[in-house]
Image: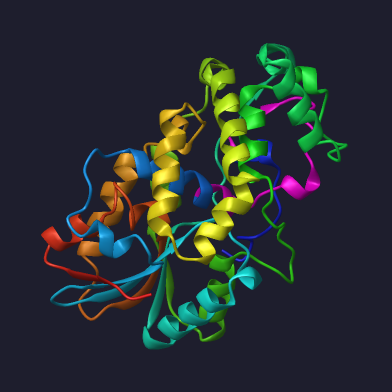
Amino acid sequence: MDDADAPWNLREACPFKGNNWLWEAAMSLTRRQFAALSLSLCFASLSPFRDAQAAEYDNALFWRARFASSEAVLFGYVRSRGDAFPDVVADGKKFIDETSSFLVDVDPGIKFTTTTFDNDDLKPIFLELAKADQEELATIFAGSKSIRSFSKLTALELNILLMGEGQQGFRPDAPSLGHTLFMYAQSLKRPMATLISQDEVKALSKPLTLESANAVGSESVVYLLNLRRRVGPIGAHFDRLYGTRESGEIAKLGEEMASKGVFDLREFIDTGIMRSLLIERLSTLSVGTDAFVTLPIGLLSGPDSICDALRSRGAEVTAIG
């Protein structure tokens, strides 16, 4: 748990490695950051329905779920640095003060099985793009000296680079929002646990194949470039939406991305079963539990919000901040 914000390379985020993949150091993510980004995108597109009270949840990051014998404050996280959102940190600390335990969705220190691919096996798509798109990408990442030859970049690499652009890098003295709150709960000596164990997550994981890695096409890169022209650097745009607590807009954008073939977490983990497990665990908390719970924002706002499922199991669910 303590290494939730230990730097890790983007290629380690996916359960495969390509020899000689070179990445900008500033683009490195933590396991929790990658999970936050991926889950907020993929969960937003799993279900065709809107929650009956969706409008209530489209501008919030915190919810309260009250069952007959237990209670939880649900916090929706995305990839964000804590010092960029002092009001969110303040609210999180307030709710941690009011609760007696701290629960996380999955262990941020989990390590996935890796499969090695040679660069020669990965399909480059840079030269498939229109000349104007090639020039725009070269300009965007002109300062990224560690990125390997543009002509050899795959769509998967470009997806991850474009989605992360503009987000602030984490440092030991500037950890993620989720880890900031974790450390605060730890300082209060709150009991801590995960809702889904490492073994369960590993059982649900499915190694990314060469075929699925190469299936990410150039059309997703064209879409992301068009999105960038519309909203600016995409990572920075997600941070702006999160800062103004526009969780519904985050979910909608995630749904749009998934429909355009942008790479997401469902490529290598069964998120549907994970969602069901989280609903079940939250619905069957021990009698007397009063917990602060961290969950991907896409599970609390947008088309695949679990709030309706929790209500169907007897909870009173309300947005509180």
Q: How many marks?
A: 0
Image quadrant where residue 309 sits: bottom left
Q: Give the percent coordinates (x, y) of residue 159.
A: 61, 32
On screen, residue 70 versus residue 181, left or right, reads left
Q: Is 25 part of what is drawn in magenta?
A: yes
211 up-or-down from 45: above or below: above
Q: Give the percent coordinates (x, y) of residue 298.
A: 38, 51
* Residue at x 64% of width, y 69% of height: 84
Q: Give the percent coordinates (x, y) of residue 63.
A: 32, 70
* Residue at x 38% of width, y 67% of height: 60
- The quadrant of the rendering that contains the N terminus is bottom right
Of 194 and 308, which appears nearest the observer?
Answer: 308
* Residue at x 60% of width, y 26% of height: 221
What residue span does the magenta drawing correspond to?
14-35
234 up-or-down from 207: above or below: below
Q: Give the percent coordinates (x, y) of residue 150.
A: 79, 23
Q: Is 106 part of what is drawn in magenta?
A: no
Q: Is residue 161 visible?
A: yes
Q: Is residue 32 visible?
A: no
242 up-or-down from 221: above or below: below
- The quadrant of the rendering that contains the C terminus is bottom left
Of 295 and 217, which appears nearest the observer?
Answer: 217
Of 276 and 259, which appears nearest the observer?
Answer: 259
73 up-or-down from 269: above or below: below
On screen, residue 78 versus residue 232, left or right, reads left
Q: How is the image coloured?
A: rainbow
On screen, residue 51 versus residue 156, left or right, reads left
Image quadrant where residue 320 sits: bottom left
* Residue at x 74% of width, y 72% of height: 173
On screen, residue 212 versus residue 286, left or right, reads right
